[in-house]
Amino acid sequence: MRKHIVAGNWKMNLTFNEADELLDELMSELEKVELPRDEQVVVCPPFPYIEMASDYANDSYFQVGAQNVSDKDKGAYTGEVSAEMLESCEIDWCIVGHSERRAYYGETDELVAAKVDQLLKHDLKPIVCVGEVLEEREAGRQFDVVKTQVEKGLFHLDTENIKKIVIAYEPVWAIGTGKTATPEQAQEIHAHIRSLLAAKYGKEVTDEISILYGGSCKPGNAKELFACPDIDGGLIGGASLKAADFMGIVTAF
Ligand code: PEP
């Protein structure tokens, strides 16, 4: 019932030519495999390459996402990109509340909620990131931290809109560190998130919401992570920058 999703977050990496090469490689690899009908591949390049990625994506196989969006409608907000602009470029997805944006750009749960609203208003699908930092895990606070992020970022949505959300659980201590959460650690937080959603929106609605895992996911560990009952795919950073690694994850279901 839930979609399996593998989304690549390129972050601030690659030049135009490198991006072109990666997209080209990715396309030719994707053409060779037959993905299950319930699996969606998403590529989130930096803004300047979105149009190029969309041109590749027009040939099918994957959809394109942005890595960030403004919480404002339009106007004098230098450097910002609105949801309306993304919609007009026919972008399907957008990452929101990534831990790097929370840590380096001061994004709060309130801002995440406002960005989610912008995206939904313009028919984009938000991939909303949550996850605890190392100190919070060491203090045993991971369940509370994630609960607050989910509640403040998403619980203002009604039943119809919550179904349009994809959540990515990304323990911050596992992002880009090579330290992956064990399948047990990931599964228990995914189950926790699903139980929070079920308590608020009911089980039927919750069963439609994909929850992805992110944090040093690689071809070598994707299979066992994706085999967990509440893990519906991955948000992939470093390993999305090499076609072979990304494909190893895309084909892990
Ligand atoms: C991320 O930043 O979303 C991420 C999961 O990064 P990495 O795969 O490199 O840990």
Image: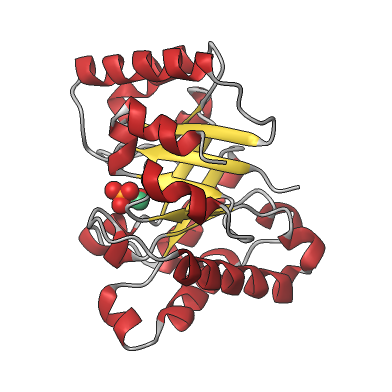
Task: Inspect this view and state whether residue 74 appears.
Answer: no
User: In the rendered image, which quarter is residue 158 located in?
Assistant: bottom right
User: In the rendered image, which quarter is residue 155 located in?
Assistant: bottom right
Residue at image coords 44%, 67%: 110
| Residue 99 drawn at (x, y percent) | 32, 60
| Residue 166 drawn at (x, y percent) | 57, 51
The quarter of the rendered structure image containing the C terminus is top right
- Image: 178 above or below 24: below
| Residue 123 drawn at (x, y percent) | 61, 37
Q: What's the colour scheme? A: secondary structure
Left or right: 167, with 71 as reference point: right
Left or right: 134, with 82 as reference point: left
Near-viewer residue (56 or 124): 56
- Image: 193 above or below 88: below
Task: Inspect this view and state whether residue 20 appears.
Answer: yes
Residue at image coords 65%, 48%: 164
Near-viewer residue (124 or 171): 171
Near-viewer residue (44 or 26): 26
Q: Residue furthest bottom?
A: 139
Q: Residue furthest left?
A: 15
- Image: 35 above or below 224: above
Near-viewer residue (222 or 168): 222
Total number of numbered labels? 0
- Image: 41 above or below 77: above
Left or right: 223, with 20 as reference point: right
| Residue 243 drawn at (x, y percent) | 34, 26
Residue at image coords 33%, 62%: 107
Left or right: 6, with 80 as reference point: right
Residue at image coords 61%, 22%: 34
